[in-house]
Amino acid sequence: MTDMSTPILEIKNLSISLPERADRKYAVEDVSLSLNRGEILCVVGESGSGKSVMTGAIMADIARGLTVEKGEIIFDGHDILRLPERDLNALRGARISMIYQEPMAALNPAMKIGKQVDEVLALHQPDIKPEDRRAETLKLLEQMKLPTPPRIYNSYPHQVSGGQCQRIVIAMALACKPDVLIADEPTTALDVTTQAEILRLINDLKEVYKNATIFITHDFGVVADVADRVAVMCWGKLIEEGPKEEVLLKPKQDYTKLLVDAMPLLETTRRPDETRNDPPVVEAKSLHKIYGAGGKQVHALKDASFILRSGETLGVVGESGSGKSTLAKTLIRLEEPSEGAVVINERDFLGLTGDDLVKARKDIQMIFQDPFGSLNPSQSVGFMVTRGLTLQGLSTKEAQKRAIELLDQVGLGEPAMSRKPRNFSGGQRQRIGIARALAMEPDVVIADESVSALDLSVQKQVLRLMNDLQSKYRMAIIFVTHDLRVAAQISDYITVMEKGVMVEFGAADQVFNDPRHPYTKKLLDAAPGRDWNPPRLSQEEVTRIAAGIERL
């Protein structure tokens, strides 16, 4: 009988140093943790807190430039950090496995899925016959609740959805029934229903295999749903650790209190003025988008219609593949609709061409999901923010003055003008994207999953910034997101999309509190930590605590 109380993994006084010119000495500093069989330990903290470096050390996968200065990682009586490479290769993927945040990065795009799962079994269990490996792979795919496992087995990664890819990566990680499973932000980019399915699966697997799981996440809703214990990291240090109920509801450390407070609640904060009769800033009229031809047509967008006035925000929610991004791209003409009209400031935006279109584009701007991917790495921030202004006829001097004002407003200032994107954090890059979009003084801003990859504290700052800028400039915002909590916090109106159709549209408080469509109810029921009511801080407490926190 397995002793569930004896730690299966122990981290003892682990310190991993950073290169000489880093902003601090240690990526991980004197961390001690234990992990028991049959439990899920959630590790939380902002980017740069040391979460991934620590769990990478468990896999003996330490990035170049980092050095283990002291400590041990004891597994099965051996120190992982001192095992020879041959023993490590036998350990990785067999007894200790990793689920990565980006499933497509973990999968070979040129190899069929079945072969990739089969390869794991062949590497660690070479005595199993090929036909038995195939049977075991199909069984794993079925356990992951993937539809038609034989079809998935013979498919390539690009032929299945993002959520299905994540399940395949989990299948690969579990192929050899590991003792320890490390999940590194496995649900970050997933919609709420897929997220709920993955969380349920990880919980179920814990019961079946009695494995121990380290779950890295910045989402406290996820923590509330799956964690047995919680470890909080800040600047390489473990600052708080304990049962989920204690850490989430009665945090001891100020840093933890701020993290918990930054989690948006699943409740609305804005009420639209439905008595307004001023002309809409943007209007969508019966938009359709059809891909393909003949019998292979895909209706990505069907009869989408809405109006939005100055200073209002429309939250667009739905599962992956529901048509959210297609709607956003169609509105800004990154995709041309198959039918319908887009009216901006009472002008037919889709009918404009040439110089008229160039001039009109200043009225509608986009903030992209991936700030790094949308910023030219070879260009300075100043050039990118001023480029649109100079194309619209402003002098270089006037454009630079405007850019500096905007960078001040987003909290970066004039020094950012000469720097390039690589010199900024993810949250800072998103602020650059916001400044670039606002440089044109647009009447409409489309934000496509613009905060989905940010830490909660950074996310809160960016959302507050967007709200403040909206109040100042009175722009209309179309906010595309899979995060219902974020949508509830920022939106006046909500539209719910399913398979290209706007199945529900209404004031945010109506949609969240009295949903009419079964699909909306399904989304709300799937929201992680739906019933969790965290302690909230007053703005005075937030300011006081933030001012008193020192970099650890």
Image: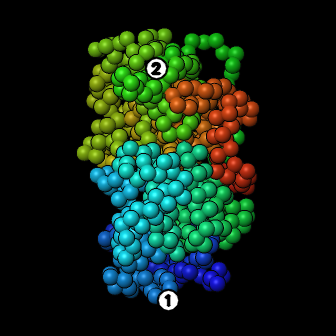
**Residue picked out by circle 1:** 77
Q: Position of residue 362 (x, y in %)?
A: 39, 23
Could you tell me which residue is drawn at 68 percent across and 33 percent down? 518
Q: Is residue 239 left or right of residue 507?
A: left
**Front position in the image: 531 or 115:** 115
- The vertical placement of 239 against 413, above or below, is below
- Above or below residue 240? Residue 169 is above
Query: Residue at the spot x=57%, y=26% of the render?
Result: 502
SS label for mark 2 = strand
State if disc 1 and disc 2 touch (CB < 8 Å).
no
Q: Residue at x 73, y 61 (%)?
A: 249
Q: Specify few, some or many for label 2: CA neighbours under 10 Å numbering under 14, 14-19, or 20 or more.
A: many
| Rendering coords of residue 131 (x, y %) | 39, 65
Q: Is residue 198 above or below residue 24?
A: above
Tell me the quadrant of the picture where the N terminus can be found: bottom right
- Disc ID at residue 288: 2
